[in-house]
Amino acid sequence: MTTTSKIKTVSLRILKIILFGFLLSTSSYGQEQTSPVTLNLDDVNWGPTGGGNGSPLGLRTARQGIDPVTGGITYYAMFPAGSHFDLHWHTHDEYVVVVKGSVVIELGEETHSLTVGSYVVIPGKMNHSWDVPLDGEVVILVRRAGPADFHYVDK
């Protein structure tokens, strides 16, 4: 096995551990559970392209569920190569895992380059924006701690 193959194998294992922990930490304990769901990224049922007014043109999403207690949604978002999501904030915390590609996120005053397997907690009311490199789309898995809202920031 080559070094590259070993790195890819380890990266995939780390991603699986992160996703398992992400899903486990965000489940609603003490609630009636729904039926189990498994989904491969290649089988995601994407909604139509959208965007504009601050979100990237060509953005596609795929809602996976809504927490019956908080109203927080879990969804995939696919951003096209070279796209930008304007500076904005949400009322509730946001939890994100990068599942495909790479992306640069501005969190407050700091900028972070994220790759597959990266996990981000975006506190409610924190300004943030996303930039996708020109070399490929990015897919993130998002879980919100409450209903989705977007408040764009004028610079």
Image: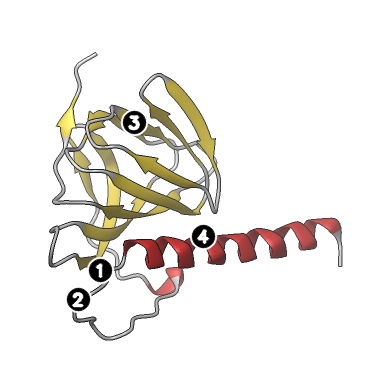
Q: Which residue is mark 1?
A: 28
* Mark 3 or mark 4, earlier in chain: 4
Q: Amino acid at mark 1?
A: Ser
Please tell me in which quadrant of the rendered image residue 83 appears: top left
* Mark 3 or mark 2, earlier in chain: 2
Residue lying at the far top in this picture: please name it: 155
Q: Amino acid at mark 3?
A: Ser
Dot 2, crowdedness within 10 Å: few (<14), some or many (≥20)? few
Q: Which residue is mark 3?
A: 129
Dot 1, crowdedness within 10 Å: few (<14), some or many (≥20)? some
Q: Amino acid at mark 2?
A: Gln
Q: Which residue is mark 4?
A: 18
Q: Which residue is mark 2?
A: 31
Q: Which mark is residue 54?
A: none
Residues under labels 4 and 2: Cα distance? 23 Å
Q: Does the residue at mark 2 contact the one at mark 1 (Cβ under 8 Å)? A: yes
Residue lying at the far bottom in this picture: please name it: 35
Quadrant where the N terminus lies?
Answer: bottom right
Q: Position of residue 47 (x, y in %)?
A: 23, 62
